[in-house]
Amino acid sequence: MPELDFDIADYAVPELSNFDPLPKGDYNAMITSSDVKETKAGNGRYIELVIEITDGNFARRKIWDRLNVDHADTETEKRARGQLRSVSDACGISQLQSTEQLHDIPFKLSLEIDRRDPTRNKVRGYSSAKAAFEINKPAVAVTSGKKPWKSK
């Protein structure tokens, strides 16, 4: 039997991960992995995006978004493909050929609490990190050209 050369009492028990849903709002994020999977019913496919929050109190938390890009219900399929277009635009990719092109590109992720399951988040949308910065950037005042600290 292997013997330990340290006393486990000297070490703190790691805190369990918090799996509560994140508060509704916008987060800086990026896609860290993606995959195409078969639906449970076996009659379609979905793209699973693994999204990681990149900063703030929830940095490193993961969110999963599933986009039913091949589905029997044409409205579901259309909505999912539109969502894929939205994330592609947010990442600055105009010609998406592989979901791997979306990996490791910062964007803004909008989340809400899922109405059907309040223990989960639901992705509301994606937007460009640059666009979000431009919206929040302070306006530059146009002045007469005189520096405000200079006397008249």
Image (cartoon, grey):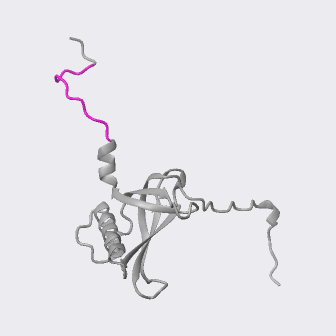
Q: Left or right: where does residue 51 sit relative to residue 119?
A: left
Residue span colored magenta: 137-148
| Vertical side of 114 occupied by 136: above or below | above
User: Where is residue 73 drawn, in percent x and y?
Assistant: 36, 78
User: Where is residue 135 drawn, in percent x and y?
Assistant: 31, 44
| Vertical side of 47 occupied by 134: above or below | above
Q: Left or right: where does residue 95 sit relative to residue 16?
A: left
At x 36%, y 59%, the residue is 126
Does the segment drawn in magenta span residue 18? no
Foreground residue, 34 or 149?
34
Asked which quadrant contains residue 139, the reply is: top left
Foreground residue, 41 or 122?
41
| Vertical side of 129 occupied by 105: above or below | below
At x 17%, y 24%, the residue is 145
At x 79%, y 60%, the residue is 10
At x 30%, y 52%, the residue is 130
User: Where is residue 72 drawn, in percent x and y?
Assistant: 37, 82
User: Where is residue 152 drawn, in percent x and y?
Assistant: 20, 11
In the picture, the quarter occupied by the N terminus is bottom right
Please count the marks in the image.
0
Q: Left or right: where does residue 93 sit relative to residue 59?
A: left
The residue lying furthest to the bottom in this view is 42
| Vertical side of 59 occupied by 35: above or below | below
Name the main secondary structure of what is drawn in magenta.
Answer: loop
Foreground residue, 25 or 104?
25
Does the segment drawn in magenta span residue 141? yes
Asked which quadrant contains residue 137, the reply is: top left
The residue lying furthest to the left in this view is 144
